[in-house]
Image (cartoon, helix red, strand yellow):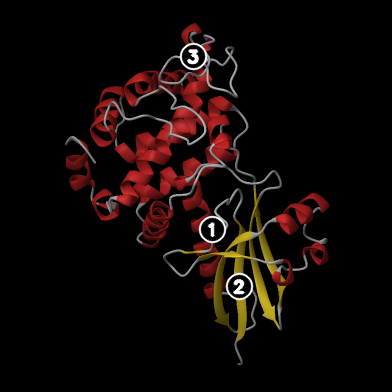
Amino acid sequence: MVESDYAVISPVWAWNARKELELPGKVRIKHFPESEKPKFKDWNEYLSGRQITDLSRTAFWFRYDLQDEPLKRNELKSKAMELVRNAVLAYQVARPVGTGDTGSFVILCEKKQDSLVLDSIDNYRRLETTRWGRMIVPEPIDFSAFSAVAAGVQEAFAKRVVRLQNPLYLLELGEEADNPHIRVLLWVAGLDALLMAGNRETFERRLFNFLRRQTFVFPAMVCLPQPKYTLGDVVCDLYELRSEIAHGREIRKAFLEEVGFEDVDGNLIDGYERSYQRRQILEEAALFLLCLALRTVFTNNLTDVVADAGRWRQHLERSGP
């Protein structure tokens, strides 16, 4: 049987680099000029008008090209779609900016002449970041770090490293959730699973060993000052808040205190109100700490170490990544 050319594509939301990128695993971030974009309006049986508009406006896409027999969603096509979906998740680890309001898509197309013709669409819930995540959208992208994360995520799934897969799934589920307390619960559970902790003392010790107590939780930005919060400032409260949520206890007043969101000089950061509560800071911290921990694993090539419970436990009980 003659093989056909296919492409699996997915929108790269908030890609501001104006540059194409080759990622490990043959997934690319590719610019689609207007002449090469699929005719999304012809997909109105599968997409809403808002989705068609948003996708039509998207210039950069994840893309994986393959050749296969013209059959529906066989193993090869499904594997290609999984590779692109993993790349989408890696992007959130490297840069937790969420996705567009219309959701997240992995789309299988058949290439015919100069156009991409829809074969099938996997439609996922939109991923919602935190306020700081929205504010980092204009920031420059670290291409080498993103490539390392993308390689690490693909390796974690290929080798079925459950200790990494589960935190990645929990990261995604937290970004899909609407309730801030559920988000905290999921993201801290992801950290707990990665650290093999099980109690607060072990959680704190291993996280401090791995990422260092004085490390800033939130990444620095070019146009805004550095938020003042270090691991030492948030980790104990973060675990306690997670425990109160998980065990159905009333949230303590200390977590409801209006404290704002301050820089290292104690000034309120633009874009935040003085009424911002401690629990809201902790929600943001949970997301960025989980992403930081996963990035540290992948950029330091620790996937095989994490896969071995004994080696990983020893690593976490030593100081430094």
Looking at this rendering, what residue extends furthest in the bottom direction?
Answer: 1
Q: Position of residue 292 (x, y in %)?
A: 38, 39
Q: Nearer the viewer, mark 2 or mark 1?
A: 2
Element under disc 3:
loop
Residue annotated with mark 2: 7
Disc 3: CA contacts within 10 A as few (<14), some (14-19) or many (>=20): few
Callout count:
3
Distance between the Cα atoms at labels 2 and 1? Answer: 13 Å
Q: Quadrant of residue 117?
A: bottom right
Point out residue 263 in the picture as x, y percentages from the top left corner.
Answer: 45, 21
Q: Residue at x 28, y 50 (%)?
A: 300
293 or 312: nearer the viewer: 293
User: In front: mark 3 or mark 2?
Assistant: 2
Whether residue 116 sits left or right of residue 131 in the image: it is right
The tag earlier along the polypeptide, 3 or 2, is 2
Q: Nearer the viewer, residue 222 or 293?
A: 222
Q: Is residue 290 visible?
A: yes
| Residue 250 shows in this picture | no
Name the residue located 23 percent from the left edge and 46 percent from the top edge.
Answer: 309
- Cα distance between the residues tagged 3 and 2: 49 Å
Residue 75, disc: none
Amino acid type of the residue that numbered disc 1 sits on in the rendered structure: Arg
The x and y percentages for residue 64 are: 54, 70
Q: Mark 2 falls on what kind of element?
A: strand
Q: Mark 1 — residue? A: 85
